[in-house]
Amino acid sequence: MKDKGFFAEFRKFISRGNVIDMAVGITVGGAFTAIVNSFVNDFINPIVGLLVGGIDFSSLQIVLKPATETTEAVAIRYGLFINAIISFVIIAFALFLVVKAFNKLKDSAAKKEEKAAAPAVPPAPPADIQLLTEIRDLLKERK
């Protein structure tokens, strides 16, 4: 009996539109990651490497055990870690810009809706009517 409830709940969850949106987001995120990795490896790292004296980060490592004829070297590849950090910062910055633009558009649309929903201010009465109103108010004060 419990399984039926669980699977029914799962089916309901899958059929909601949010799951489709999430799947599209993950797919686009994967493609975006490939673009960012290429950008970091092919553009940013050479520039940063040039600034720090021609060092290629991807080759930076600490060799713990040198390679022999039968085994590969055991090394801590901290250069790859630096590349990952640079990729993360670029991705985070790009997402920040996207969210900022989305929020700006959302705020702009909300302001337009508020403006459309706000009642219009009636136009000011003509100058002669304003003058007559002031005279009336002054006469009322005298009494």
Image (cartoon, grey):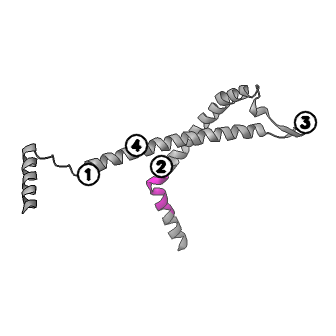
Callout 2 touching callout 1 (CB < 8 Å): no
Q: Looking at the rendered structure, which numbered label has been put on residue 21?
A: 2
Q: Amino acid at mark 1?
A: Ala
Residue under numbered circle 1:
117
Q: Amino acid at mark 2?
A: Asp
What element does badge 4 sit on?
helix
Q: Amino acid at mark 4?
A: Leu
Label 2, residues with CA under 10 Å away: few <14, some 14-19, many ≥20:
few
Q: CA distance from mark 2 to mark 3?
A: 48 Å
Q: CA distance from mark 1 to mark 3?
A: 74 Å
Q: In the rendered image of this protein, does residue 138 appear above or below residue 38?
A: below
Magenta part mainly helix, strand or loop? helix
Q: Residue at x 77, y 28 (%)?
A: 55
What element does badge 3 sit on?
loop
Label 3, residues with CA under 10 Å away: few <14, some 14-19, many ≥20:
few
Name which of mark 2 and mark 3 comes first in the sequence: 2
Q: In the rendered image of this protein, does residue 36 appear above or below residue 132?
A: above
Residue under numbered circle 3:
67
Q: Residue at x 25, y 51 (%)?
A: 118
Residue 39: in magenta span: no
Query: Of the residues tagged 4 and 2, which is closer to the observer?
Result: 4
Residue under numbered circle 4:
105
Query: Of the residues tagged 3 and 4, which is closer to the observer?
Result: 4
Q: Amino acid at mark 3?
A: Ala
In this rendering, position of residue 109 left or right of residue 7: left
Query: Of the residues tagged 1 and 3, which is closer to the observer?
Result: 1
* Quadrant of the image occupied by residue 35: top right
What element does badge 1 sit on?
helix
Q: CA distance from mark 4 to mark 2?
A: 20 Å
